[in-house]
Image (spheres, helix red, strand yellow):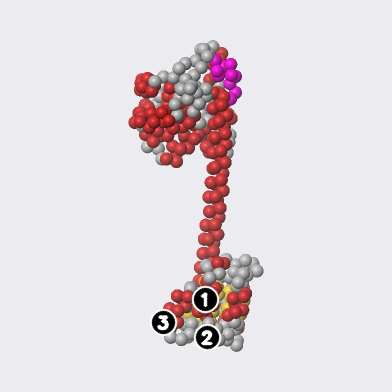
């Protein structure tokens, strides 16, 4: 596509009276007439145009000029029309092989030439527009990828902050994310959705940043007041994340708010029941409780894997969405491998 300063049509002809051609295009198009191939090479070396019309003849090698112009990157999508001479079939073949877009053979018909030229100008502009659209789409994809990377970095930092406050054994959030992947896979969720839920799940306890260490690390049972304070972390986490423009942070807010809801409606903070609990919260509930059970804490040793598995089975339909439990158990070998790779013991 030409700029405002570029001609739309460049005519290269050695005929003594080029006005016979130029009047076919002006004033509809900004037109530049050149009398020599070398002048065309010089003029078009660094400027664009929609159509170059080249009249072949004894004093102007149209085929050589087409080859040279087609090598210029900014003219790759420019329409090149050759007004041929000589034996028709051979002239057409040579011009098209050199890179011409169209070939017009004598006798010339001015009206036909106008129509064909108009179509070639439109073709050049459409191709240039498509290329600009693709360039824009490519840039948008690049910006989106950078934004997504920054978003994940923010989530990772928030995850580290939450883990630093509350995870005495180490690796809790990583194991929870791995268990979330296993459940989502067992449920048949698309990989991208599973990965998003897993990443967002690492912030399910971000609200515990506001809980005092005396409560968070208390070695014995919590008092009623302390238990109420601890339960506030679900709402606090939601408030911290919910008004973010980030889709992943809003997903994390939903998980923070709902991962302590129970299938039978006895959970907190809103007492949601069954499928009224968003699926990401139901998935994270199974993963979080399982890892909490097998992990050493200041107030208890970690459970063996089989005991934790039995607890999930017993609580399916009460505490947990049964479908999420069965999906988790269907990937049990993967879960065992995850725990063996990242043990949940204090020594590890």
SS label for mark 3: helix
Within 10 Å of the Cα at label 3, are there few (<14), some (14-19), or many (20+) other Cα atoms?
few
Would you name the residue on which mark 1 appears? 66
Q: Position of residue 16 (x, y in %)?
A: 60, 88
Q: Which mark is residue 57?
A: 2
Q: Quadrant of residue 163?
A: top right
Q: Main secondary structure of the magenta part?
A: helix
Q: What residue do we see at 37% from left, 34% from top?
A: 186
Q: What residue do we see at 37% from left, 20% from top?
A: 307
Relative depth, front residue between 16 and 292: 292
User: Magenta region: which residues?
Assistant: 209-218
Answer whether residue 289 is visible to the viewer in this image: no
SS label for mark 2: loop
The answer to whether mark 2 and mark 3 are in CB contact below 8 A is no
Q: What residue do we see at 56% from left, 48% from top?
A: 143
Q: Position of residue 157 (x, y in %)?
A: 57, 34
Magenta-drawn stretch contains 128? no
Relative depth, front residue between 298 and 86: 298
Task: Tell me: residue 335, above or below residue 50.
Answer: above
* 3D distance between C-alphas at marks 1 and 2: 14 Å
Task: Tell me: residue 86, above or below residue 65.
Answer: below
Q: Is residue 44 left or right of residue 268?
A: right
Mark closer to the chain start, 1 or 2: 2
Q: Is residue 315 left or right of residue 35?
A: left
């Amino acid at each position: 596509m030409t700029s405002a300063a570029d001609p739309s049509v460049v005519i290269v002809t050695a005929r003594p009276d080029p006005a016979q051609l130029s009047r076919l295009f002006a004033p509809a198009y900004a037109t530049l007439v050149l009398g020599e191939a070398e002048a065309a090479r010089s003029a078009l070396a660094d400027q664009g145009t929609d159509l170059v019309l080249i009249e072949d003849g004894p004093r102007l090698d149209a085929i050589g000029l087409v080859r040279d112009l087609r090598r210029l990157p900014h003219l790759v999508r420019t329409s090149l029309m050759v007004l041929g001479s000589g034996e028709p079939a051979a002239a057409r073949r040579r011009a098209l092989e050199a890179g011409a877009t169209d070939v017009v053979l004598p006798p010339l018909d001015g009206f036909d030439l106008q129509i064909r030229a108009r179509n070639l100008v439109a073709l050049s502009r459409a191709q240039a527009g498509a290329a600009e659209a693709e360039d824009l789409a490519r840039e948008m994809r690049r910006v989106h990828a950078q934004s997504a990377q920054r978003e994940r970095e923010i989530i990772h930092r928030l995850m580290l902050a939450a883990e630093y406050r509350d995870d005495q054994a180490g690796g809790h959030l990583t194991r929870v994310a791995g268990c979330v992947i296993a459940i989502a896979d067992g449920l048949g969720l698309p990989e991208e959705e599973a990965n998003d839920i897993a990443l967002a799940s690492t912030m399910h306890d971000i609200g515990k940043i506001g809980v005092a260490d005396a409560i968070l690390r208390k070695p014995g049972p919590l008092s009623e007041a302390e238990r109420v304070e601890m339960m506030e972390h679900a709402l606090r986490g939601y408030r911290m994340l919910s008004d973010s423009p980030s889709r992943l942070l809003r997903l994390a807010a939903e998980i923070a708010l709902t991962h302590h809801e129970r299938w039978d409606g006895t959970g907190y903070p809103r007492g949601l029941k069954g499928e009224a609990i968003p699926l990401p919260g139901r998935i994270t509930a199974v993963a979080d409780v399982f890892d909490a059970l097998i992990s050493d804490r200041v107030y208890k040793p970690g459970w063996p894997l089989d005991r934790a598995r039995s607890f999930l089975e017993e609580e399916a339909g009460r505490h947990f969405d049964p479908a999420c439990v069965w999906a988790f158990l269907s990937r049990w070998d993967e879960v065992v491998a995850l725990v063996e790779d990242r043990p949940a013991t204090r020594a590890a």
